[in-house]
Amino acid sequence: MEAIERLYETFKRPVFAIAFRYTSNSTVAEDLLQDIFLKVSSHLKDVHDIATFPAWVYRIAVNTCFSHLRQKQAAGRDPVSLTEIEGGMAEAVFDRHEASLKGPIEEAIRELPPGLRGVFVLHDVQGFKHEEISRILGCSTGTSKSQLFKARARLRETLRRKKVV
């Protein structure tokens, strides 16, 4: 039990951040965090290589978030603004130009297909390297790089179409 508590303490912040970025809702992210760690603790026996353990945990987190989003989409709910993720404008310091870009950028990120959005969020938002993303998502490093390139291109295209940049 003590070992599981240490795992939870080690991974709770990055896993919560992933769930938060995918769901845009802190309450849902907390629920997903609990679901993710239930899955992690119940499948610890499936881990055969300690070196891949962090990627395994993140993979469970991403898959759980994707499952949640699929269920949410099937239910027809509207996505919540990414503003909640950042704690709102009141907690952050922005100049006017940055503040005016925040909404359109968040909307453009939400419009990305799940695969592109996943790589974009993991790399550009969470700061993972392509090698880590490839282990988390179970794809090649080249695929991760390609998906990130496509995601950035789509974001630029969307922002230009909306005359934001």
Image: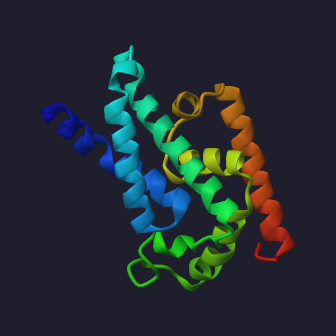
Q: In which quadrant of the rendered image does the C terminus lie?
A: bottom right
Residue situated furthest front in the rendering: 75
Q: Quadrant of residue 133?
A: top right
Snapshot colouring: rainbow
Is 56 rendered above or below residue 109? Answer: above
Is 57 rendered above or below residue 19? Answer: above
Q: Quadrant of residue 43?
A: top left
Determine the residue positioned at 40% across, 67% down: 27
Residue situated furthest right in the rendering: 161
Determine the residue positioned at 55% across, 46% down: 122
In front of the other: 130 or 23: 23
Q: Is residue 121 left or right of residue 163?
A: left
Q: In which quadrant of the rendered image does the N terminus lie?
A: top left
Residue situated furthest left in the rendering: 2
Q: Position of residue 37 (x, y in %)?
A: 34, 42
Determine the residue positioned at 46% across, 60% down: 20
Q: How many marks?
A: 0
Q: Quadrant of residue 69?
A: bottom right
Is 133 rendered above or below residue 164? Answer: above
Q: Position of residue 33 (x, y in %)?
A: 38, 51
In front of the other: 134 or 24: 24
Q: Position of residue 67 (x, y in %)?
A: 58, 48
Is 95 rendered above or below residue 17? Answer: below
In front of the other: 100 or 69: 69
Determine the residue positioned at 45% across, 29% down: 56
Q: Position of residue 90 (x, y in %)?
A: 41, 85
In front of the other: 18 or 122: 18
Q: Is residue 128 left or right of residue 154?
A: left
